[in-house]
Every structure is written in structure tokens, then in C-alpha cells.
């Protein structure tokens, strides 16, 4: 099978400490929808893997004097000495056509374990910088990324005069992390306040997730190309 005919790959990076949470059910629903659409789905469950989120000098070869994390990332990428676990995650990231960050929104942002994954795996020299630039010149141009998450409060709270616009809270993730390394960022899939929903409403929310992810899969560039063949 040629590369153009190969099934697209989705990497879901999941960050919730409770395997029976709605957030985990939402991730599982998304993964199944992608598989049904013909994707190969790779799931990284950061809590179950006991991912260490801290970017630290111990990740790198001994450094004399001032420790500059991004300079050390560049050196490790160039010399092939990245931490073995980080390298394995980076390889899985680079192999994916679609990145899905799955998480509960905590303090209007990513959980620390997921932010730490970005800190360590979005290594300078591998996905930006070095031989690559930023944004449209970064390494992940041509790939897509999206956010799949839950909130504690209802949608009515995310508006000016209350919490503020959801777009404002997501800007640093969308622009400062994902677009920064070249991704085309898709609309987020959000379930607002699942803890306050009835069982029937949660079931309906999962169906909405399934439909939203199926639409993302159907709009994959390879899917469109195949339909024109």
C-alpha cells in the first residue's frame, strides 16, 4: 500500500486521572469514532503512563554552567540524545496526521501534566527552530490538531461579563502551542459542565462528541482526495 493510500493516524493525548470520568468516556468515544472512519488511533494516557511533566536538566547530558532548556533540546535533537521516553512520544507525534488533546479544563487552561507534555515533547529543533521556523515554517505544517475537553461550568458562564469568552481562554493553546508549530487548528469539541448533567444528557453529549469527531474525520484531506479519485 502506498503512502498516499495509508490510513491516516490520530494521536490522542489524554490527561485525566480518573479512568471512569466523563472526560475519559469522551476520549474513548472520540477514539472509536475515528477508528470507524478509518483512522489508526494511538492513545497516550498521560496519567496511566505516570508521565513526568517537568522539563528539567536531568533530561539532558550534563551541562556545565547556565542551563538553557531550549538550547539543550536543540543539542539533544541534533545529537540523537533526547530522553528515550520523550523521543518515543515525539516519534508518535510526528507520525500523526491529527493530534487531539483530551483533558478537563482546569483553571481555564490545560492540566499541568498535559502542559508538561507540550513542554517536553514539542522540542525545539524537532518541531520548530533549528531547521524549522515558526507557524507556517514549522515542522507540523500540513497536519491538524484539535482540543477535546470538558468544563466545570455551563456554557452560559463563558461569555463577556461572567468568566469571559472561551476563545480568549483558548488563544494561548491554539496560537501559542499548536499553530506555533505549524498545525491547522480545528474547532474544539467541548462538553460544558458534565458533572451537572443527567445521565440522559451525558449520553446525548457523548453522541454529540461522536458526531463532531466523525465530521472531523470525514473532512480529512486524504478523505477528500479519495472521494475525487
Image (cartoon, rainbow, N blue to C red):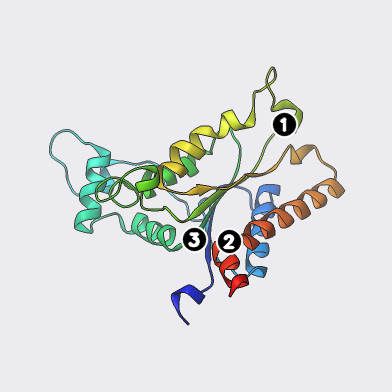
Kindly identify which numbered label has been placed on residue 132.
Answer: none
Give the residue drawn at x 63%, y 56%.
216
Whether residue 124 sits left or right of residue 169 in the image: it is left
Q: Is residue 107 visible?
A: no
Q: Dot 1: within a 10 Å radius of its alpha carbon, few (fewer than 14), some, or many (20 or more) residues?
A: some
Q: Nearer the viewer, residue 48 or 93?
A: 93
Q: CA distance from mark 2 to mark 3?
A: 9 Å
Q: Residue 37: give x, y in percent of width and height.
A: 65, 68
The answer to whether mark 2 and mark 3 are in CB contact below 8 A is yes
Give whichever of discs 3 and 1 has the lower sequence position: 3
Q: CA distance from mark 3 to mark 1?
A: 32 Å
Q: Which residue is mark 2?
A: 220
Q: Which residue is mark 3?
A: 97
Furthest-top residue in this view: 161
Q: Please tell me whether mark 3 sits on a helix, a strand or a loop.
A: loop
Q: Please tell me whether mark 1 sits on a helix, a strand or a loop.
A: loop
Whether residue 13 sits left or right of residue 122 in the image: it is right
Q: Which residue is mark 1?
A: 153
Give whichever of discs 1 and 2 has the lower sequence position: 1
Q: Residue 176: give x, y in percent of width and height.
A: 44, 36
Amino acid at each position: 500500500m502506498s503512502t498516499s493510500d495509508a490510513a491516516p493516524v490520530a494521536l490522542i493525548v489524554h490527561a485525566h486521572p480518573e479512568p471512569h470520568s466523563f472526560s475519559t468516556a469522551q476520549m474513548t468515544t472520540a477514539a472509536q469514532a475515528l477508528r470507524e472512519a478509518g483512522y489508526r488511533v494511538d492513545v497516550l494516557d498521560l496519567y496511566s503512563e505516570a508521565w513526568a511533566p517537568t522539563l528539567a536538566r536531568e533530561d539532558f547530558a550534563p551541562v556545565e554552567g547556565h542551563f538553557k532548556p531550549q538550547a539543550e533540546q536543540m543539542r539533544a535533537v541534533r545529537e540523537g540524545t533526547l530522553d528515550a521516553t520523550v523521543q518515543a512520544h515525539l516519534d508518535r507525534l510526528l507520525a500523526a496526521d491529527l493530534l487531539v488533546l483530551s483533558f478537563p479544563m482546569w483553571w481555564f487552561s490545560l492540566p499541568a501534566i498535559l502542559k508538561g507534555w507540550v513542554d517536553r515533547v514539542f522540542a525545539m529543533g524537532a518541531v520548530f527552530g533549528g531547521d524549522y521556523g515558526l507557524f507556517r515554517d514549522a515542522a507540523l505544517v500540513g497536519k491538524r490538531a484539535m482540543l477535546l475537553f470538558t468544563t466545570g461550568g455551563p456554557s452560559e458562564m463563558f461569555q463577556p461579563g461572567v468568566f469571559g469568552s472561551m476563545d480568549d481562554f483558548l488563544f494561548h493553546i491554539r496560537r501559542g502551542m499548536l499553530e506555533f508549530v505549524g498545525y491547522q487548528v480545528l474547532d474544539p469539541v467541548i462538553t460544558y459542565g458534565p458533572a451537572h448533567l443527567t445521565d440522559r444528557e451525558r449520553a446525548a453529549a457523548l453522541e454529540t462528541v461522536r458526531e463532531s469527531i466523525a465530521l472531523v474525520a470525514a473532512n480529512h484531506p486524504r478523505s477528500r482526495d479519495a472521494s475525487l479519485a
